[in-house]
Image: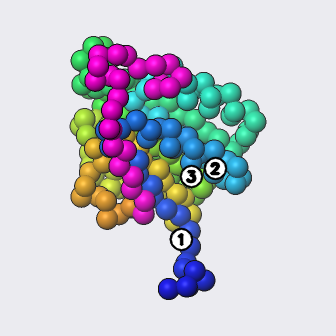
Amino acid sequence: MAFEDYKQKDSVIVVYTGDGKGKTSASLGLMARALGTDFKVAFVQFIKMWEVGEHNFIRTIAPIYKDKLDFYKGGLGFFDAGELSSKATREEHIAEARKTYDFAYNAATSGDYQLVICDEINNAVHDGLLTKKDLQLLIDKKHPQTSLCLTGRNFPKSLISKVDIATDMTKIKHHFDDKLLANKGIDY
């Protein structure tokens, strides 16, 4: 098939998943590309309630992009990560995930955004804070002109057929396995 025979979709669904590093970083690159193309973008954070570099970055650039970038920081931390988890109860985690999901769903279905990034939503689904049906509904009901990016470990294999681009970030080596903590500015 010749290049001129290819068609372009009005929007795509992108998934960054896997146990390797780089899922959020890839979504931030996608955000930069979209903003550079004059898209309106919503960046919705599902898990990281503590201050991380990407939150500071988004808050710093938000005034530059004025009404083109909305940032919603939801979540109460890792749900079942032992000592890294917040002290919130399961019910509190679910309630916060639901509030964050509602914001993401409204953004994705409104037609007001060309890109909605749901960072760590796959973790929220895998941990039972949201359901696979919630994720499917978000995919199925998104506005036809809105691209959607879904990040986090454990994207449901049963939903792969519903997305356009899926990248599995595979860990080859990470210093955490040697009992070394994440590095600020590199890992978070």
Between 19 and 116, the one lying in front of the other is 19
- The residue lying at 53 percent from left, 64 percent from top is 11
- Marks 3 and 1: CB-CB under 8 Å? no
Report if residue 70 is visible in the image: yes
Q: Which residue is mark 3?
A: 115
Magenta region, residue range: 164-188
* Residue 152 coordinates in the image, percent (x, y): 37, 40
Say above or below: 40 vs 60. Answer: below
Between 57 and 132, the one lying in front of the other is 57
Residue 154 shows which numbered tag?
A: none
Residue 33 shows which numbered tag?
A: 2
| Circle nearer the N terminus (3, 2) | 2
- Mark whose residue sits in front, 2 or 1: 2
Q: Is residue 169 magenta?
A: yes
- Marks 2 and 1: CB-CB under 8 Å? no
Between 24 and 126, the one lying in front of the other is 24
Residue type at numbered disc 2: Arg
- Label 1 Cα neighbours within 10 Å, binned few <14 / some 14-19 / many ≥20: few
